[in-house]
Image (cartoon, rainbow, N blue to C red):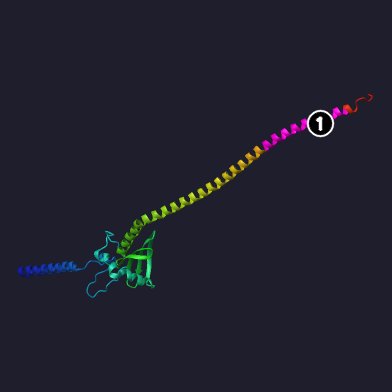
């Protein structure tokens, strides 16, 4: 083979190698991102004619978690998610995954298995306030945690009011018990004072009666002595002139 033929073969091989490399790069750039960035489920992008892998049941955790709702999520309640969830709760297709209660507020994470859809609800006294619907498991968990934090904040004043009402009722009950005790003690004291007055009056009357009786006794004794003197005098007169033994 001459020198020109060898050079021609080398050039053709180089051109073919560059073409293969360029085609591989172009194909790699045209591949879509993994679905795990959008809905939390891992997927495999298949070559033409290859078997497509099913999404994994274990959602991938997002690298950056944020509790801020997207504009679409913020409008979902107005779009009828509340009414939709209320209707679905009447059936048996929903599964309650998590629920948090703080005071009269609560947050729930519900799962509709047939549609692989999550409902995150914020409610007060069993009345739905906000409902977010998503097929992203990680996003649903994040919104649920945010709603749970909101119930904690919203219930602070309510719980404080409940505690203050209980403290007020307890204090009023203690006041009533103390007042009742004071009333009983006052009644006992009034009875004691009345009885003391009665006793004092009785003692005074008794002392007066004793003085009067003493005077009457002294007068009676004086009368007795006078009567005895009179008896002796009469006896002496009666026996006057009689012989003395």
Please say if 83 is above or below 181: below
* Magenta stretch in the rendered image: 206-235
Residue 98 lies within the magenta run: no
Rendered-image quadrant of the C terminus: top right
According to the picture, the residue beneath numbered tag 1 turns out to be: 227
Query: In front: 166, or 227?
Result: 227
Asked if residue 116 can be seen in this view, the reply is no
The front one of 169 and 68 is 169
Q: Nearer the viewer, residue 12 or 244?
A: 244
- Between 68 and 223, the one nearer to me in the picture: 223
Residue at image x 61%, y 41%?
A: 197
Residue 68 falls in image quadrant? bottom left
Residue at 34%, 66% (x, y): give it. Answer: 128
On the image, the x and y values in percent for residue 91 come to 38, 73
Q: Crowding near pointer 1: few (<14 within 10 Å), some, many (20+)?
A: few
Q: Assign the N terminus to one quadrant of the image.
A: bottom left
Considering the whole magenta stretch, tell me its main secondary structure.
helix
Q: Is residue 20 left or right of residue 114?
A: left
Determine whether, in the image, residue 101 is placed left or right of residue 38: right
Q: Quadrant of residue 87?
A: bottom left
Percent x, y of residue 25: 16, 66
Q: In the image, is residue 212 above or below residue 30?
A: above
Q: Is residue 175 left or right of residue 50?
A: right
- Which residue in the rendered view is the most extreme toward the top? 244
**Residue sitting at 57 percent across and 44 percent down?**
190
């Amino acid at each position: 083979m001459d020198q020109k033929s060898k050079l021609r073969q080398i050039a053709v091989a180089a051109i073919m190698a560059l073409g293969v490399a360029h085609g591989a790069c172009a194909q790699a750039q045209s591949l879509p991102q993994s679905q795990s960035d959008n809905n939390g489920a891992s997927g495999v992008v298949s070559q033409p004619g290859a078997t497509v892998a099913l999404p994994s049941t274990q959602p991938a955790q997002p690298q950056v978690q944020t509790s801020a709702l997207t504009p679409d999520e913020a409008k979902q309640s107005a779009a009828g998610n509340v009414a939709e969830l209320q209707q679905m709760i009447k059936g048996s297709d929903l599964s309650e995954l998590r629920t948090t209660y703080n005071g009269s507020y609560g947050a729930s994470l519900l799962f509709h298995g047939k549609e692989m859809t999550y409902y995150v609800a914020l409610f007060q006294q069993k009345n739905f306030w906000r409902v977010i619907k998503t097929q992203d498991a990680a996003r649903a968990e994040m919104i649920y945690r945010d709603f749970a934090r909101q119930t904690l904040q919203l219930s602070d004043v309510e719980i404080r009011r409940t505690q203050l009402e209980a403290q007020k009722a307890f204090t009023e009950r203690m006041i009533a018990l103390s007042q009742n005790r004071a009333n009983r003690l006052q009644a006992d004291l009034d009875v004691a004072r009345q009885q003391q007055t009665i006793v004092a009056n009785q003692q005074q009357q008794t002392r007066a009666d004793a003085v009067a009786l003493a005077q009457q006794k002294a007068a009676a004794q004086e009368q007795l002595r006078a009567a005895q003197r009179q008896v002796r005098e009469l006896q002496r007169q009666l026996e006057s002139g009689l012989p003395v033994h």
